[in-house]
Amino acid sequence: MASLKRLLVGSPIRTARLAHERLTKKTALAIFASDALSSTAYATEQILLVLAAAYLARNATSFAHVVPISIAISLLLVVVAISYRQTIHAYPSGGGAFIVAKDNLGTLPGLVAGASLLVDYILTVSVSIAAGVEAITSAMVGTRFAGLHNHRVWLCLFFIAFITVANLRGVREAGAMFAAPSYAFIFSFLILIVYGLVRYYLNPGIVPVPNDTDLKVAEGYHSQSLNLFLLLGAFANGCAALTGIEAISNGVQAFKQPESKNAATTLSWMATLLIVMFMGASVLAYVFNVHPLEHETVISQIARVVFTGPMSWFYYVVQATTAAILILAANTSFAGFPRLASLLARDRFLPRQLANLGDRLVFSNGIILLAIFSGFLVWAFSGDTSRLIPLYAVGVFLSFTLSQAGMVIHWWREGRMPPSSGNVKAHSGSGTPLRKAPWRRYLLINGIGALATFVVLMIFIVTKFIHGAWIVVVLIPLLVLMFLRIHRHYVDVAQQLSTEGLVGLRPIHHEVIVPISGIHRGVIAALEYAKSIAPHHVTAVYVNLDDEATQKLREKWQQWGSGVNLVVVASPYRSLARPLFNYVDRVRRSSPNVIITIVLPEFVPARWWQNLLHNQNTLFLKGALLFKKGVVVTNVPYHLEH
Amino acid sequence: MASLKRLLVGSPIRTARLAHERLTKKTALAIFASDALSSTAYATEQILLVLAAAYLARNATSFAHVVPISIAISLLLVVVAISYRQTIHAYPSGGGAFIVAKDNLGTLPGLVAGASLLVDYILTVSVSIAAGVEAITSAMVGTRFAGLHNHRVWLCLFFIAFITVANLRGVREAGAMFAAPSYAFIFSFLILIVYGLVRYYLNPGIVPVPNDTDLKVAEGYHSQSLNLFLLLGAFANGCAALTGIEAISNGVQAFKQPESKNAATTLSWMATLLIVMFMGASVLAYVFNVHPLEHETVISQIARVVFTGPMSWFYYVVQATTAAILILAANTSFAGFPRLASLLARDRFLPRQLANLGDRLVFSNGIILLAIFSGFLVWAFSGDTSRLIPLYAVGVFLSFTLSQAGMVIHWWREGRMPPSSGNVKAHSGSGTPLRKAPWRRYLLINGIGALATFVVLMIFIVTKFIHGAWIVVVLIPLLVLMFLRIHRHYVDVAQQLSTEGLVGLRPIHHEVIVPISGIHRGVIAALEYAKSIAPHHVTAVYVNLDDEATQKLREKWQQWGSGVNLVVVASPYRSLARPLFNYVDRVRRSSPNVIITIVLPEFVPARWWQNLLHNQNTLFLKGALLFKKGVVVTNVPYHLEH
């Protein structure tokens, strides 16, 4: 086991190397942006899936609404990106929604943001992996591997396992592994857009007749007329394009110095690329009259039309890089989830094991938890992206809203502070007191961001509630309750363990009990040990399972007892533990101020499999005795040779 | 968990009730004979499956050989039954093949017999359950539940689980549960035979045309001419009818007194019924020209032809009782396997846990092991009886042969002994020395039995080797090797633990180490305890994970150390255990004659789920320190309140 772990994960890394594990802007763009950019692979399709409901009701122009909806989403994206640039500068040590909301709005809103983000990270993995596998199975349509579509859940689980191992190895190695596919995706996607638009304007006749026998409609939608509610539903679905945009603000510390500046620049690059790619995909879907299908993604359909003849090999480049970026997009969460979980754990809202750095300087426990939860979701929703989407954006937009609202309070407080104690980073380099102008502008920008994301959140909950959003609406309060419960426990334990009121070490009165199963070297060693603790307070206890054996033991005791008192207890039901526990309880009642030490003789076989050949009574007794107050358990092992 | 166990298994039973858990002859017949009698449900079919290979090669009369083959098997059965009656009388305390072979031939042949029987018991469960489920799915042919055939593995596993629970409740309750179905099967099967023969002789025109599109051939056989090898293969397959006949001789002690007489009488009833039922089934298969089919058993086909019109409801009675007896036949093994395993365990050839009586006075561990192995076989062979049969009879006939050969030696030795020390049970009631006459006859009978079963064993191995018998031929020697390895370990442990050469208890020199993670009430309690063992030999060890925290600890130590030496050890890889172990090893090397006690402070949460919120470092340290020689581990628990 240990060597398997070493093979997969690598050798441990010294704590002293912690500071060196930082990312350049280019590598960071590959890691953090992959989530946001990869969403262009499915965001357009999610809009079309809702519009398909009106198409089913014979509204022939229904799919044309994808363009205005995409423009609205792009505007929202600009607002959110600008808002988050401000957060990065205000929180150079890493300002995720959790920290911003906690600092400015209080603990409870902070925990709500934390819960939202945890859920969001898990869904990012599930959705990205599912969409990546769909890109692969789309490319198989028409080949003899078309049946792969039926095994997508297993493919998803395989890829989750792969990324988990990569991340357990440590963040820089993982970054190097992901840079090439990220850039390959960006370039092939840009080529698709430019080449596709050029081909269309040169020859609009290449637009194919859509195949409506395989038409797919969003989960929970049926044939209906095109009304505002449907358009809002399509808009909400498309907002999946915005997910992941907050990842950079939460991970500023992973950047090389100067962290804030590098992070903000990376965020701008990312937002620009995202708008270009998302709008490009939506416009192409519109001009090529693409309809969402059960067995092939929208991007795959576009690429098949665009790249024909001598260029048809590039179709496979687009699908391969799309699959790669999507599967690796999950990596954003593998950086973000464990980091956020460790922040919550340090504040005692999650188990402290999540705050420990593993062998390879990563938060291994958080990585493993994320893999388990996201794998479960993929399995529960059969690896179908469109069924996972309704769960997705609630957490995202709730944390956006809380984060922006927190920033509004942040600027408001700063505006009311005297100049000398203001946030240094928020000022320009000049010595003149320019403070008043910027904080108002900053407050306004974040205020618009908060309002916009809150409105989208409401639209999302209203339009998607019955399609799955309710799960997240129920889950987030439950998570917050769990955080609070855990926190209460840790505070309570700290109080109970406090040395307050103690005055130095006190003496102890011993009573020693040695449970014996016969007389052998293991028992002799235990008796020797027991007598060394309290020479005149040792009792050997024997459970009578067989009168004949008991009689033999009494005779041998004459020779080996060395004056130690032997007590034989009855056991009508052949249990060893019950009569022994009853005896211990009697001693505790008769001498309440004494510490009872149970000295357990235990022989340790030389090989592990030999343990299977012996009753594990000692192990069981140890576990059960742990729960008795005033009882100390001592193991005297006797080591067997071979 | 505990209450689930009570619900399924019932309350514990006192040891004192052991003697009352005995069986009447009628109940014993139901339990022990169910295995042997139930084999009539598939034995005829196993013969036909081999003969089908010649039928495929256009030998139209191939299936007619089922009658002479069945007669040969019945003769063999008489020989074996008479031989086993002698064993029962010679071994009134229960003489399974293991005991008889061990007593007379030596330990190694005894172990071979033991291994054979264990394998046989497991296969009895798998084969019986699989055949029982086939009886159920046969009855579904032509109904809308015909698809049940595809879920037979799950059905098998369900029934194994059911019988396991019944047996964990205890043998008498299990017997009462099984008596009614056993007798219902016997009567319905006898009615089938009588009614079928009468109907045929009144109107031979009812014989149907066989459906050869669904024809099934035994696993591994293909179209071939009817030669001796094929006939021997068919004979070997049919010998499955003999399995289970030895169960009574192994379980004589489960009978009411006088055990031997009751057991022998039950065996005679059983053999008679078995011959009547098996021959009846084979003759009916012959006269009704039944061919083995993929989706319907031979018995089901016969019963469909026999019971028509107003009697057709009785078809379902036959199928239901057949299924019931087969599924409950597995029960024979649930009595025999744990009993044999406990005998082997008492002789130290298997883990001693198998010798322990459970809560309900049954050998629970053996019952559970049998359920696991037989369930695995059913799963591995897709619940197909004909694929399991080639594995089946090797173990059975190997143990028959060894048992009979052992009896030959038994009588031979008795014949050479002076009259006074002879086996009392083997004599007639008269006072005259008639000893010489019976022992020669007994020897002859068992000799014929040994020879006959040995010949069948050879036929079986030769004809079935490549079809699966090789698995058992390989497995039995491996099991024997395992027995010997386990035995060597137990003998070795007994020697190492022997008090030989010791003279009373010796004094101990202590060195006490208290690993601490800070200063709190749990640590204070541990330090108090450590000082009480060896006031001037206590060292507290702190692993430095963070220089700042270490500095704080050193300051607090001034107040709380009470003169105890504090050692701080470095940990470049953030491990707690490694630096601590290195320190312990250093102390061991510098003071080799000292007993090192590690006092581990451990705080015990009030609720189980709270354990998830704390590092399980103490548990891990306990486990790892157990393997260090000269190290005693003491747990000082500190109990949290809520």
Image (spheres, coloured by chain):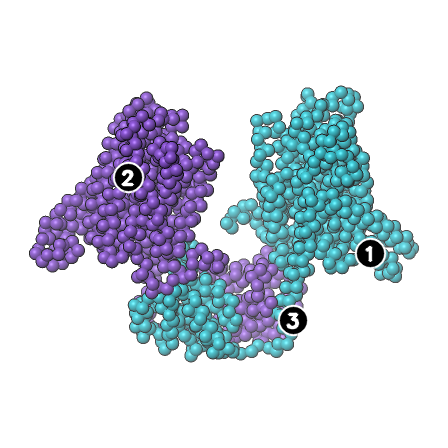
Chain colours: A purple, B cyan
Could you say whether the residue bearing mark 1 is in a helix, strand or loop? helix
Three-letter amino acid code of the residue under disc 1: Ile
Q: Is residue A409 left or right of residue A59?
A: left
Q: Chain of mark 1?
A: B
| Co-location on one chain, circles 3 and 1 | no
Determine whether the residue tagged by mark 2 lies in a helix, strand or loop.
Answer: helix
Residue bearing mark 2 = A277
Amino acid on which the number 2 mark rests in the picture: Met
Quadrant, the C terminus of chain B: bottom left
Distance Cα–Cα, label 3 vs label 2: 90 Å
* Camera-side residue of A273 and B250: A273
State the residue at coordinates (63%, 64%).
Answer: B489
What residue is drawn where x is 63% and y is 59%? B352
> In which image quadrant can residue A577 be found?
bottom right
Q: Which residue is mark 3?
A: A555
Residue that carries the numbered disc 1 in the rendered image: B409
Is residue B41 shown above or below A564?
A: above
Numbered disc 3: what chain? A
Give residue A370's position: percent from left, percent from top: 38, 49
- In the rendered structure, the answer to whether residue A288 lies left or right of residue B8 reads left
Marks 3, 2: nearer the viewer: 2
Q: Are marks 1 and 2 on the same chain?
A: no
User: Against B58, is A132 above or below?
Assistant: below
Q: Closer to the N terminus: mark 3 or mark 2?
A: 2
Chain to which mark 2 belongs: A
Number of residues whose C-alpha sits closer than 10 Å to that of mark 1, classed few (under 14), some (14–19) or many (20 or more): some
Residue B340 showing in the rendered view: no
Q: Position of residue B605 (x, y in %)?
A: 40, 58
x and y, in percent, of residue A31 in the image: 32, 49
